[in-house]
Amino acid sequence: MRVVIADDEPDVVSFLKSVVEEQGHVAVSFSDGNLLSQALVRETFDLLILDWNIPGKDGLATLEWMKQSLTERPPVIMMTNRSAKKDISDALNAGADDYITKPEDRSVVAARINAMLRRNAGAGAFDSKAVYGKYSLDRIEQTVTVDGKTIALTAKEFELADLFFRNADRTLSRNYIMETIWRTTAALATRTLDMHISRVRSKLDLQPENGFRIFTVFGYGYRLETIAKAV
Amino acid sequence: MSLRIRLAIEWLAIGLFATVIVVTALSWRGAADFDNLLYDKLSAASRPPADTQVLLVAIDDQSLSALGKWPWDRSVHARLIEKLQSQEPRSIAFDILLSESGPTIPDQQLARAMGSGPAPLFQPLHFSSPGSEGRAYDTVLPTPTFMQAATAVGHVNILLDDDGIVRRTALCFRADEDGPAWPHLVELVYRGEKGSPSPVAQADGNCRTELMIPYSRRGAFPEISYADLLSGKLPDDMLRDKDVIIGATAAGLGDNFPTPNGEGGLLSGIEIMANMLGALRRDDFIQPLEMPWLVGLSLLPLWLLLVGFLRWRPRTILLMSLASLAAVLTVSAVLLAKHVWFPPSAALLGVLLVYPLWGWRRLQAMSDFMESELTALEQEGDANPLPIPQNRTTDMVGRQSEALAGAIDHMRDLRRFVTDTLADLPDPMFVTDPDGKITLTNDLLAERLARDISGGPLPEALDLMVSDEHRPAVDSYLAKSDDSTASPEFVRFMSKQGLTFVMRRSEVRSQSGLLHGHIHYLTDITDLARAEAEREEVLQLLSHDMRAPQSTIIALLDRDIDDNAKKRIEQNARRTMQLAQDFVDIARMGETEFVGEDVLLADLVREAADSLWPLARERSIKFAFWDSSNAAFVLAEPDSLQRAICNLIDNAIKFSPDNASIAIALSRDAGQNIVVTITDQGEGIAPDILAYLFTRFATTGEKKGRIKGTGLGLTFVRAVIERHGGSIVAHNDERGGASFVITLPVAPDG
């Protein structure tokens, strides 16, 4: 697949290029926002990794432009030096599909790229049973088994866990989660989601030791991250 | 010329001028008409009753028509006197001049009748003027025949006042200095009765005294006609024991005079004598005030007023002047009742003179003063010129008054301007007088001190304001700035409230250079001082904390890059980034308002630990969670709060030995708080840095603490926790590890 890397720092570009190519994809790089825009009109890409501070037309402006000018647009991963969560949620709300804060580990970057490409390719199996690391999900019984032990979950908790596992390494907005699980965003106390996630986290003991962690993107949503065993 | 001297000179001048006028008026009797008029009116108020022992025998018109044309044959008089004597009167005053000899027989008849007794008979003498040989008077005695026949001879002079009215008399008369002193005829009558001179005559040793006659009502004395007496038409006992006065009353005989009781008509000489005799007997002659007394009494109200002028307000002066006039008149009336005559006109004149004079001089002085002050004010380069308004509808003084009112208005505006300016100064200030008493403060100072210090002494105010540590510096600045120009321009001190101030003092001097006090300006430089300290810290950060990891990286690059070197380079790079992030976060935190969102604290803490899992795993460090927070939410800025907790866990990992377990516990305390405790298994915190563990860069410098190089992290942590309304403390637990305890308020339900 064709992945666009839009950044003006050669070191960052070559790092990302190596990650993308390692995963068996084609990497195309731009160091100017305006040139990028022209290319996006002419060509089709499967993923855009966009730097916040790219010269010419910056990241946020490019996002806005894409929303207005492109009928079909690739998913966008925003790259930023800024770790201020406000900036991140701004980017996500402006149309970015995910984000990576520089510097990030090679494995994390790879996982995020793959998750994005998978979604774009219509990923997400609906087999009756699925295995994610040490967690086995039985979608018919709605149970999760870890190390041979079955963990009892409520229907909502199972749906939440399933949603996360299926969308591992993708950032999900709160609205998306609530619409998917509760079929509504209205009349739902904001704390309800937090508390469900908290319970899923404790019951399944989702922590790096077990190969997963739930990451809160404050002001936007959540992400289940898979932890690479070896760095 | 100063106002005081001018006042003294003018006061004295007015006093002396008035005195001269009064004394002149007294000696020239210039105002005698008024005095006389007043005397007449006053004396008419109470007239003595007529003396009933006096009987007048009048040679009236009826007698003239009965006995023929005057002068009569002296035998007629002889007959009358014989008739009188036969009725035994007490005395006879025969007021008919017998200074020329007549036909011998009648003269002898009369002399015989006069001398036969039993009643003493007194004869008048007279004086002709001008006298011979340059003398003022020639004494004209009765002829020797009659001189011999009469018991005694006395004068019957009439004293006419300037207005021709008879008010006064003299009981004694001397024609010239060396001549004999002739008693008045009535004095002789009195002596004849009493055997001794009257008290007033005795008092008049020099024969100079003039007395004023207290007149009885006109016509009050019984009077009989000469002709009737002679013809025997009267009852026999009528004359017994009376003092008989015989004289002319007929209009043509020229012995009638105008008197105060005449009510326009004339009083005969014998009635005047009757009045005098009555006064002698009663001893109630009215004595004119002697000159020294008169002068004194005339000047007294004038000078009393003058003294009063120096103290009283203008209205009082007017009232007191009017009162003085009344008082003078009253005193005059009262004295008259006591038979002493005080002519008041000179005293009145003095009072009337001195009031307008004083008013005029004061008005002039006031006018001059206003003029000069307004001019001076104008010349002082005041912002607004102060012209005297050209309003023609009023006089000069009126216009000056308007100008003065304008100037006062202007001053009032200026004063208000100054007061408002002081009150609105952006900095606290206060003013002291030369004695060091605080006379003025502005609102800002009261606000800063949370109390009003005006009116108090300076040291007391300084006690309130200046911290004990900086007090000597402030005192020495205040002591120095008085005398030397080389003193420092300001003093910097820390207040007891922890604010930093710069104090400047400047002198307030009047136009003439007199020291009025000092203005003390305080400038609150707390923010500046803090910024200064922060700048120092930034420099510290840049010069040491930021450089140190970079230097390490450069040193590592110098040798073969193996895995170990790579890892250390990464660690140092991350440390620099962490520092930069912390620094930016701290700076940003000071600039923005706290905007919290609902955060499930347990998950936030877990994720913080998750993010540090790679670090922990490298050294086989485990996290041990105890969560009894019961899914408590806090109102948080999740971003910074999570990083704060990360910092603490990061530290815990750093200072724990390999394979250690880091305890992370969440619990609810008794109140609405959630407590997060992070305890490591390291060597604990050195006691000497526990005290300032959370102050910025506490670990930089020579201190070799266990947390060297993490200084900014803990400062950041404390700033974040406090921003969240919580608190953080650190201590070493019983097993020796460091334990950080965060307390955060639970968010309200919602």
Image (cartoon, helix red, strand yellow):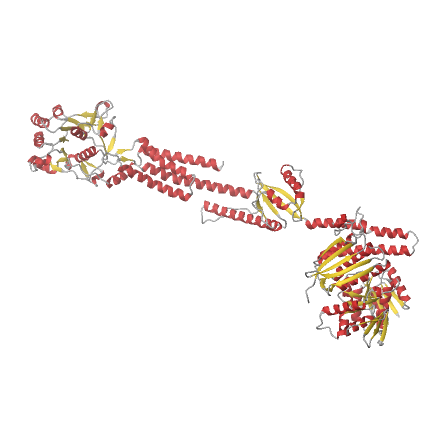
Q: Residue B673 in the image: x percent, y percent? A: 70, 60
Q: Is residue B100 above or below residue A138?
A: above
Quarter of the image for residue B201 reads: top left
Q: Nearer the viewer, residue B489 or B733?
A: B733
Query: For the C terminus of chain B, which image quadrant?
Result: bottom right
Q: Residue A83 in the image: x percent, y percent? A: 79, 61
Q: In the orientation shown, which residue stands out farthest toward the right?
A: B560
Q: Residue B278 in the image: x percent, y percent? A: 19, 34
Tell whether B87 sits left or right of B466: left
Q: Nearer the viewer, residue B486 or B555?
A: B555
Tell whether B490 sits left or right of B310: right
Q: Nearer the viewer, residue A197 or B368?
A: A197
Tell whether B479 sits left or right of B581: left
Residue B381 visible in this rendered orientation of the protein = no
Q: Residue B135 in the image: x percent, y percent? A: 23, 24
Q: Is residue B442 above or below residue A161?
A: above
Q: In the orientation shown, which residue stands out farthest toward the front?
A: B734
